[in-house]
Image (tube, helix red, strand yellow):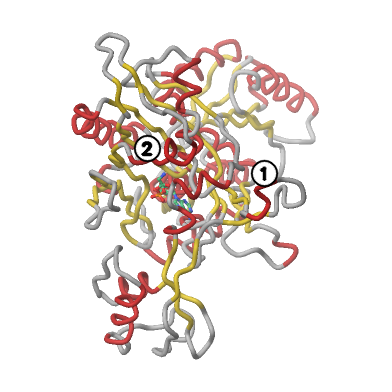
Amino acid sequence: MTKKQDKNNLQNEDLMEEIISLCKRRGFIFPSSEIYGGFSAVYDYGPYGVELANNIKAAWWKAMVRENENIVGLDSSIFMHPKVWEASGHTSGFADPLAECKGCHTRVRVDHLLEEAGVFADEKMSAEEINKLLKENREKLKCPKCGGHNFSEAKEFNLLVQSNLGNFTSDWSKTPVYLRGETCQGIYINFKNVLDSARVKIPFGIAQIGKAFRNEITARQFIFRKREFEQMEMQYFVHPDESDKSYKEWKERRWQFYLNLGIKKENLKWHEHENLVFYAKAAWDIEYKYPFGFKELEGVHARGDYDLKQHAKYSGKDLSYRDPQTNEKYIPFVVETSAGVDRTFLAVITDVITKEKLEDGSERTVMKFPKELAPIKIAVFPLLKNKPELVKKAREIYDNLKSQHMCEFDDNGNIGKRYRRQDEIGTPYCITVDFETLKDETVTIRDRDTMEQERVKIKKINEELKMRLAKK
Ligand code: GAP
């Protein structure tokens, strides 16, 4: 079967529906606690989802830690001393303005309502100013659930997720313990430990991948806005005079990361923050063109010395750096690159999902993952499942390949259905053992994108696949 058309003909809502449905059907993403009716804005990664997410994290770790002599890794805890969140400003300032629809009692983020109605709301606005805008634009603002225009006054709603850890034992039990709202705070509080143990010198970076938690109000857009999500953050500590230069470099490098990952350039763009938080020197987002429009995928921030200064102040510890050559003592500036695993996952899926019409009039959905990211690299099939000699041979090939590549053995249904399924989960190569195999020790290797099949000697499979998988 050859292709008539190679075109992604899915648009916007249809595309979002298609992605959500395929992710569920093929075991990429499940809504959390589904058997109990679901749990809003929390999702679970299924068998193929966890492979894709791991491949994304591995690509980030390679680009940030392995390929940079002066960037080291860290895995700090989700729980931190409550003072961390006071020092960072999260307990007082990490909040969204919320209003309730008086018709259906849905709580909505006022900044989102205003944005959707085309009304400019400054991030630094007080609750009073936000409420003034809410009143003035009443007719323009529409409840996303019932379409009503009548809202309560907006109130600030803190995004930190509270826990009761240690409530019964510790001295600080009166202060709530939080699940971390961002991973970078774990990096700042370990700055001195890393400095004293890892023989790093400024400039250097600390990278971390880990879960973060936020009481997001607007639970929508699938895994784009989750309440439990994963961040890939790197904090680069530099001399204050080097901060601008370093910021520019990191902007370029993070942009290139997505291109190297295979994301289409036309689906990426830069967005500059108009209103910076008071300590920030610069903030730009890399946005991706999701099915619901261009939205933040990663933030690149010049944070100055705010974070280390705050933690020095709240902990009473000296978090300055002494240059071993010049003896100069200073608080380093931070350049932060902050990406989301889930948002990269959704960007990758959006980028690669393709529907193709085939010559026989049928259609196939194919996820054209770059090979590095594909959850399964090779699937191995016996042509027929009730022929023991074919099954035995296919098993031998699978057993031989599985320690080197993520492979799958499949003998369910007919061969056409198996190819269709592997196309949907984005497997680059399928190997089929058929009756010719028994005669001449060859198998077919089918290419996901061209659907072409080539006969290859079994003893050449390893070499052939290694070569094919290494190609971009
Ligand atoms: N340390 C800086 C920081 O946390 P942020 O812009 O709030 O900055 C950084 O978050 C990245 O984390 C975002 O660009 C996004 O990829 C991811 N992220 C933030 N909130 C998220 C959510 N609710 N669900 C999924 N990903 C999220």
| Residue 424 seen from this side | no
- Give the residue pinned by disc 1: 414
Of 285 and 342, which appears nearest the observer?
285
Q: Position of residue 226 (x, y in %)?
A: 52, 56
Q: Position of residue 295 (x, y in %)?
A: 34, 56
Task: Give the SS element for disc 2.
Answer: helix
Of 362 and 252, which appears nearest the observer?
252
Lateral position of residue 164 relative to residue 419, left or right: right
Lateral position of residue 372 relative to residue 239, left or right: right
- Give the residue pinned by disc 2: 309
Question: Which amino acid, mark 2?
Answer: Lys
Lateral position of residue 48 relative to residue 453, left or right: right
User: Total number of numbered labels?
Assistant: 2
Q: Position of residue 133 (x, y in %)?
A: 29, 80
Q: Residues within 10 Å of mark 1 (few under 14, many from 20)?
A: few
Question: Which amino acid, mark 1?
Answer: Asn
Q: Quadrant of the C terminus?
A: top left
Q: Position of residue 175 (x, y in %)?
A: 61, 54
| Residue 162 seen from this side | yes
Q: Residue at x 56, y 61 (%)?
A: 41
